[in-house]
Image: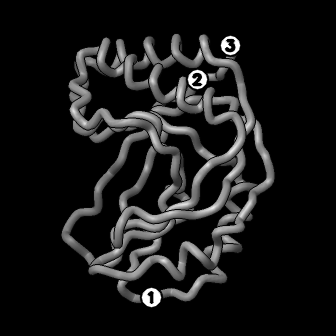
Amino acid sequence: MRLFAAVLPPPAAVAELREVVQGLPHDEALRWTAQEGWHFTLAFMGEVGEGPLPELQVRLERAAGRTAPFVLRLHGSGRFAHRALWTGAAGDLDTLRLLAERADAAARRSGIPMEQHRSYHPHLTVARARTEVDLRPYVEAFAGFEGTPWPVEELHLVRSNLPGGGAPGAQPRYEVVGSWRLRG
């Protein structure tokens, strides 16, 4: 199963972002992500067998227990070259990065090879390009976006179910397989 650790924005934050995204021009060259899947990935683990799952869950619970709740808000926009359009985060980014490091360490210590380790850049992907698209107008259109602050109180382990059959526009389905309260 494909797994990742994540912070999930609450419904009110999702609604604010949805309103902004709906106001953007919709180019057919972009594949807009489903709001049900909006999240901040903390640690992408890729394919994980059943074996390490119990230890991973124990270690993620420990990571959540050592991290105090904190405040985030959706903030601004950006792009990764011509491939992805995203909104970022503002607020207690130091704690968000610490939680990402702890989730990554939990996976490693559970025996999961974390080969995609890179510096953490918090973002929530709202669209991906099917072909090369100039994303600058989209970035500019919601560059001033400032969401309402919300408390981050849980760490989630999420399973990514990839669409089968190659249907156009098919999106992954995300299933929360574990959640732990941040307690600090």
Among the two numbered marks 2 and 1 on one chain, the one whose residue lies closer to the N terminus: 1
Numbered mark located on residue 166 in the image: none
Label 3 and label 1: CA atoms lie apart by: 44 Å
Residue at the location (57% across, 60% down)? 87
Residue at the location (40% across, 81% down)? 134
What residue is pinned by disc 2? 180
The amino acid beneath tag 3 is Gly
Q: Position of residue 171 (x, y in %)?
A: 37, 65
Q: Quadrant of residue 144?
A: bottom right
Query: Dot 3, how many residues are within 10 Å of its Cα: few (below 14), some (14-19), or many (20+)?
Result: few
Residue 33 makes an appearance in the image:
no
In front: label 2 or label 3: 3
Query: Dot 1, how many residues are within 10 Å of its Cα: few (below 14), some (14-19), or many (20+)?
Result: few
Question: Do tag 3 and tag 1 residues touch (Cβ < 8 Å)?
Answer: no
Q: Quadrant of residue 74?
A: bottom right
Label 2 and label 3: CA atoms lie apart by: 12 Å
Residue in front for this viewpoint, 118 or 70 = 118
Residue 17 makes an appearance in the image:
yes
Tell me the element at label 1. loop
Q: Position of residue 168 (x, y in %)?
A: 29, 79
Quadrant in the picture for the C terminus: top right
